[in-house]
Image (spheres, coloured by chain):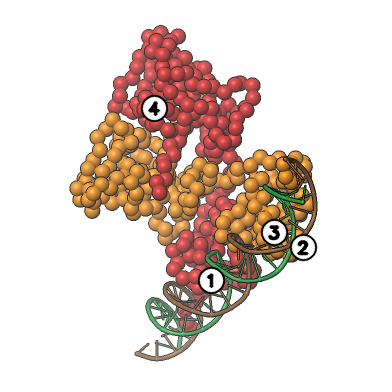
Chain colours: A red, B orange, C brown, D green
Amino acid sequence: MVKRSQGIGPRHSKILTFMEKYQKQYGFPPSIREICDETEISSTSVVNYYLDQLETWGYIHREKNISRGITLIKDALDRLISENVTPITGKLDDLVRIPLMGRIVAGLPIPVPPSDLAYFDPESAIDIARSMLPQREKPEELFALEVQGESMVDAMVNDGDVVIMKKATEAHNGEMVAVWLLDKDETTLKYFYREGGKVRLQPANRTMQPIIIDDPRTVQVQGKVLMVVRRLPAAA
Amino acid sequence: MVKRSQGIGPRHSKILTFMEKYQKQYGFPPSIREICDETEISSTSVVNYYLDQLETWGYIHREKNISRGITLIKDALDRLISENVTPITGKLDDLVRIPLMGRIVAGLPIPVPPSDLAYFDPESAIDIARSMLPQREKPEELFALEVQGESMVDAMVNDGDVVIMKKATEAHNGEMVAVWLLDKDETTLKYFYREGGKVRLQPANRTMQPIIIDDPRTVQVQGKVLMVVRRLPAAA
DNA sequence: CTTGACATGGAACGCATGTTCGTGTATAAA
DNA sequence: TTTATACACGAACATGCGTTCCATGTCAAG
């Protein structure tokens, strides 16, 4: 006979996965037009067409004449996976709020959080997805500093960048640390290597030369750098 | 003074509990008029009034001009139950999962989301707290790239860094963009300035000289950089 | 080639729904 | 009392958004 209806196609799965992503992100379902944008289908009627199919096939449920009244049936995505069409995102929505303790300036030691308890005003905090942090780090030991000035350029860190740190007084080889150099009276960010009796501080920018410290006692490790975040101004 | 604002009242809690019940039952949030019926408030503006209060008090989140774009903040009901009248503004803890599309290399154009195929590879995604992103960015338009090579050092971006970008083909002054230089056949990250008929590309590292492009047509903007994230190896 | 189900677009149409505004009442402080 | 503010109502108003209709394109069976 005539042309037969295909089963789930790329647009179907795209719609389903988008619906899941959207619902998770915003807490409510997308509108048809938003699905249009995502799937780059220009006509609402086409999306409507696919949604009708998905409903008759039991993947979604629609409430007539209700805005965003389109919901995933819970095992729809599981069925998709089992049909080997699409891998789907596992979830781990866990946020860690890290206090922004102050600024890190070349000429001053860094402000370290009081070890007793975290008092911090929520205004100045940085939210990081837990999945972005090294697994074992305890969020309570973390804090963030905003870099002030251009003195960390050789660590590839710019004015305004935020560094996420962990309290530490010593470091292992290869870790990036914030150190206070007693003989220079300055704070700097470098990769840390202990070599024999000496300490080598290696800039992140590999075109630059390392600093070799003969007397390890003149190097005070103030924290380990776990992450650097640069937020760029979203110009109008 | 005059009459003080009462804290959470019976109507507030009625709205909150109804929202939870409704969301659980239908899978999407109620409309204002449906809340009217439930709470036996005759006017939508009154419900709107309460919703505004609940939002400023951090119990719910509202998306402007979006049907049913009203969601519970997760511990709102817990706070209700514990009866704490906490007027603390709860930031909504919302994660955005940004697909890691590939790598950005000096010698190649950047991979832009095909916007056609299902582009979700759960293994390679970056989670960013929504509060860290510019408010108006739609997460759907964002993607992430891992920087490969040392060629972006003058943009203060290192090998292994992850840049979070937004699709764009043109830029405003002062925005950091990924551009493809036709005459050099390379991708680079620079601050973008249009000056007269020319384009100035300014390295983030201010000690370095800008590139002046006489013919703007040889500069193809491939995306705006919103954020740079550097995860440092957590040495043992 | 013709046919007819499937697939896409585009553009209205109309209800659903958030928003705003004018107005009115009650309460508490000055 | 006066006054400022919280609370309340209803009615428009402006969009958001689902729905429908019509035209067109594609492809396989007859």
Q: How crowded is mark 2: few (under 14 residues within 10 Å), some or many (20 or more)?
A: few
The residue singled out by tag 2 in the image is: B40
Residue at 31 percent of width and 41 percent of height: B190
SS assignment at label 2: loop
Residue C1 lies, with reference to residue B196, above or below; the image says below
Query: As rendered, which of A207 and B204 lies closer to the eye?
Result: B204
Label 4 vs label 2: CA separation? Answer: 58 Å
Q: Tell whether A208 sits left or right of A104.
A: left
Instruction: Kindly report which numbered mark, 4 or 3, lies closer to the viewer in this rendering.
Output: 3
Instruction: Kindly report which numbered mark, 1 or 3, lies closer to the viewer in this rendering.
Output: 3
Residue at 51 percent of width and 27 percent of height: A102
Disc 2 residue type (three-letter): Glu
Disc 3 residue type (three-letter): Val
Give the image location of residue A71, x and y in percent: 62, 62
SS assignment at label 4: loop
Disc 4 residue type (three-letter): Gly
Do the residues at pointers 2 and 1 share their chain? no
Q: Are marks 1 and 4 in contact (CB under 8 Å)?
A: no
Q: Mark 4 lies on which chain?
A: A
Q: Tell whether A4 sits left or right of B154.
A: right
Q: Residues within 10 Å of mark 4 (few under 14, many from 20)?
A: some
Q: Do the residues labelled 3 and 2 touch (CB within 8 Å)?
A: no
The residue singled out by tag 1 in the image is: A48
Label 1 vs label 4: CA separation? Answer: 54 Å
Residue A175 falls in which quadrant of the image?
top left
Label 4 vs label 3: CA separation? Answer: 50 Å
Label 1 vs label 3: CA separation? Answer: 34 Å
